[in-house]
Image (cartoon, helix red, strand yellow):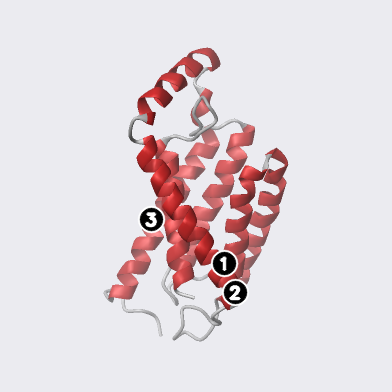
């Protein structure tokens, strides 16, 4: 049966929905301001964030079903494959899209379960290890970027902005890195993915 709206599980689920929705919306706004290549990556992140928000909605609340989610994330996987032409650093988008498609396959069990099947232990375990590492590494990078590296990066970005018109607000700094807000957004989505995988 659907979760009580005031149960601890429901509150946690709605907090995850909020976290993913805010992150996805930020990525969507960043995609609209970015140049074509950066916009493609940001758009993929927006699909991931908003899709995670939909998937995290407590069972029995939303009108969508696993087939819709599976179709969306299969399409996102194709988009992620297309992004790989610009470099293997986009592989994370592909892993995320495939992970979401995999989770969509496990949805749709009886109403008493958040997932119909537990999934394949090897696949679930590999994804847990990947996202645990991603979250730890992302957190370390965010802390480092917020420390001594930030003034230097800000100075470089300011110089580049003067010569290029500011980079279009893509969330990418002058040296090809990403700004702190974008790092925090990606970290939030990675944490959300880890939380959802832990329920399987």
Q: Identify the element where label 1 is drawn.
A: helix
Contact (CB < 8 A) between labels 2 and 1?
Answer: yes
Above-or-below relation of 156 to 127: above
User: Between 108 and 62, which is closer to the camera in this rendering?
Assistant: 108
Q: Identify the element where label 2 is drawn.
A: helix
Which residue lies under the disc numbered 3? Answer: 19
Q: Identify the element where label 3 is drawn.
A: helix
Residue 159 in the image, given as x and y percentages of width and height: 47, 15
Above-or-below relation of 14 to 7: above
Give the label, 1 or 3, closer to the camera: 1
- Residue 189 in sight here: no
Which residue lies under the disc numbered 2? Answer: 122
Residue 104 in the image, given as x and y percentages of width and height: 58, 70
Measure the C-alpha gap from mark 3 to mark 2: 28 Å
Quarter of the image for the N terminus: give it: bottom left
Measure the C-alpha gap from mark 2 to mark 1: 6 Å
User: Between 98 and 74, which is closer to the camera in this rendering?
Assistant: 98
Residue 149 in the image, given as x and y percentages of width and height: 38, 30
- The earlier-in-sequence mark between 3 and 2 is 3
Which residue lies under the disc numbered 1? Answer: 126
Q: Label 1: few (<14), some or many (≥20) within 10 Å?
A: few
- The image quarter containing residue 183 is top left
- The image quarter containing residue 182 is top left
């Amino acid at each position: 049966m659907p979760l009580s709206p005031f149960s601890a599980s429901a509150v946690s689920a709605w907090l995850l929905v909020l976290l993913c929705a805010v992150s996805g919306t930020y990525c969507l706004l960043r995609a609209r301001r970015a140049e074509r290549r950066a916009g493609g990556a940001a758009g993929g992140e927006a699909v991931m964030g908003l899709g995670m928000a939909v998937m995290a909605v407590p069972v029995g609340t939303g009108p969508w079903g696993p087939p819709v989610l599976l179709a969306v994330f299969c399409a996102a996987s194709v988009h992620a494959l297309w992004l790989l032409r610009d470099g293997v650093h986009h592989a994370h988008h592909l892993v995320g899209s495939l992970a979401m498609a995999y989770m969509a396959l496990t949805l749709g069990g009886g109403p008493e379960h958040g997932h119909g099947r537990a999934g394949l232990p090897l696949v679930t375990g590999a994804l847990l290890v990947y996202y645990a590492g991603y979250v730890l590494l992302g957190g370390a990078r965010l802390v480092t970027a917020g420390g001594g590296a930030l003034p230097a990066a800000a100075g470089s970005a300011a110089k580049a902005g003067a010569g290029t018109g500011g980079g279009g607000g893509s969330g990418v700094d002058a040296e090809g890195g990403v700004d702190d807000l974008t790092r925090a957004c990606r970290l939030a989505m990675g944490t959300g993915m880890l939380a959802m995988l832990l329920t399987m």
